[in-house]
Amino acid sequence: MKLLVLGGTHHVGRAIVETALERGDEVTTLNRGLSRPPAPGVRALLADRTDTEAVTAALGDGEWDAVIDTWAWAPRVVADSARLLAGRIGHYGYVSSRGVHRWPWPAGADESAPLVDGDPASDDSADYAAAKRGGELAVTEMYGEHALLARAGMILGPYEDVGRIPWWMRRLEKGGRVLAPGPAEAALQYIDVRDLAAWMLRCAEGGVGGFYTATGRSGAVTVGRLLTTALEVTGFEAELVWAPADLLRQEGLALGAELGLRLPDGSTPNGMHDANVDAAFAAGLTTRPLRDTLADTWAWLQAEGDPSRARTPPHPTPGSTRPPNSASCANSDQQGNPHARHHHRSGNRWPGRRSAPVPDRLEYPRHRARPQRRSGGYAVTFGGIGYDAAERMGILPDLEKKSFITEELVYHKPNGDRRFSLSRETIAATTGPRSMNILRGDLETVLYERVRDHAEIRFGTSITAVDQDPHAVHVVLSDGTVEQADLLIGADGLHSATRSLVFGPERDHLLDLEHKVAVYMLDKRPASIAPGTTGTLSAGGRTVAVISVGDGRNVAFFGYRSGHAHPGEDAATELHRIYGDLGWVVPEALAGLERADSVYFDTISQVVAPTWHRGRVILLGDAAWCVTLFAGYGSSLAVGGADRLGSELDAHPGDIGAALTAWEKALRPEAERKQRLGRRVKGVYAPANPLLLWLTQLPLRLAALPAVRRYMVRRFIKG
């Protein structure tokens, strides 16, 4: 059979070419010729498929029995190829995806399941499912019953450049205890790339057309069998520790997303591994044993090394406005967004390969079905280097519009009676003129609104694997895509996935300060809290505060010593148990928790890391230092640090290593100074006994005295 392969160098295309050669087919490939040399015996045509004139010239007047097309991006490219080959081929095989079926997939779904919309003339590659469906329409409109649409499931085997089995094998190679996505008996449905290739070639030779779900049978393999077999064929010594599905879902962990076992929030995607494949098997599809797939994958990794994991288009598709910068930021909250803002403002002057999407920081809500950007959050005093950076970035006026003034800070007794209060002027005197009070979520909103039109921000996405070489960093995301960039910025918070993947496990970096915190927005203001005021109460190693922002929003804040906590308790159970005996507005605040959209609930810990950068990966904000709310400077340090990073990259064009070294040298002294402050004052945050509480509040009581207040106003505000 005379075969034309459009592609032929990566994963599926490579398997098709090699399988065809083994069959004795006469093989021609068309690609750019940049990835790897053609296999011996292949006639190689060179052209960029997005360039129609170049493709026309390369094809000449050639004729073939069949063509197999592996294109995964803009459907218009498939349509152009289908049109150019009309009358010169007898069969058009297109490697599609199960993703063309509308989500969610019902259990046992077959080829009749609903499909997404697609446009064969589209130049858009952003929506993978829509792009594949557009490619299907382009092929069937031109070739009808002579078109084969192979809707592949998860494709494993040699040459895999997505980072599924290669990532797991490298993790198992390290040994030790390996966290595995439970339950072990969860079914996996996949196809070996060589089985897919052989079946498509047989269909081409036999003139078999139509659309088929091309994957293995459901239930034949489980995730437990896959990982234990991987240990057997590699000979690695590692202990699999199975994380229950409920725990992964509760914690919002996407472990197993690379195998299609989890959604980004840790939940199980029903129907992902339960497709009906009777039609494909009736059309001749066969599959090989799991052991063969894994053994051959390991042999390939040993022979050729890790894959590049660069499954992105060779360059922006026609009409794309994707800028040629190269910063990928994991979780673009107040830490990552300032870097994006600086990077845009500076005109992306440091050279790079391409921009990668920014996975946005998410808060998983209590009631809503979909994740959302963090909103509200606890109040922070924003000043210092953060204030200076905001002024340089031109966002200070927007921040000031969202800032609020606390008219009075009232300290209460457990029964609700006043102990003492601080006036607006006294509070201002303690913070200084170049600072403001603002909710963390509002700070992020200002930054997000400034960068959203200049950076690709991908919601509901987390990092599952990172690889780097001297020239680039490659990131596998939980949505199955792989991105390549010059620099990966891990601004993904206290429990940073970037830090765990590149710098080592979380336990090696967290310093527990023996306190916990819960913060959420209240849907109504307690009657005893006046608009624009803050009330707080401390008793028995517990602190609670209700903050009225003044624009109708109200924040409940709970902080307490870890000795009160019970392992495994959720926020509602723990807060009701610990604070249920207190009066004042505490019952109203606890009742508001049941109606809150989301809650921030975590331990208070610092991050102690000997270095904040490794190769082309850098940690930023809480992922790097987390000074904690005890120090009261986290947001300012994060924004200022992000802006300083942009400045150092500008100052060291083409030398990322020098830029990162200079950045860390400049910033680390201040971060460590604030960390020492946080550790020093943690004992007064939620005083454990009345005497310590009295001593803690004594300076504040003195500040409330008229004479002291007048001095502070004169010294710190007017002077």
Image (cartoon, grey):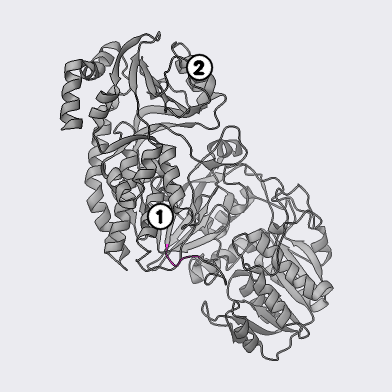
- Callout 2: SS: helix
Asked whether residue 332 is in view, the answer is no
The residue beneath circle 1 is 340
Residue 341 position by quadrant? bottom left
In the visual, does 232 lie left or right of 555?
Answer: right
Asked whether residue 653 is in view, the answer is yes
Q: Which residue occupies the extreme bottom position in the image? A: 61
Camera-nearest residue between 69 and 357 = 357
The magenta region covers 322-326
Residue 629 place in picture, x, y as percent: 34, 32
Q: Mainly helix, strand or loop, the magenta region? A: loop
Going 75% across and 47% down the picture, which residue do you hit? Answer: 106
Going 36% across and 10% down the picture, which residue do you hit? Answer: 413
Q: Residues within 10 Å of mark 2 (few under 14, many from 20)?
A: some
The residue beneath circle 2 is 588
Residue 76 place in picture, x, y as percent: 66, 72
* Cα separation between marks 1 and 2: 40 Å
Q: Residues within 10 Å of mark 1 (few under 14, many from 20)?
A: many
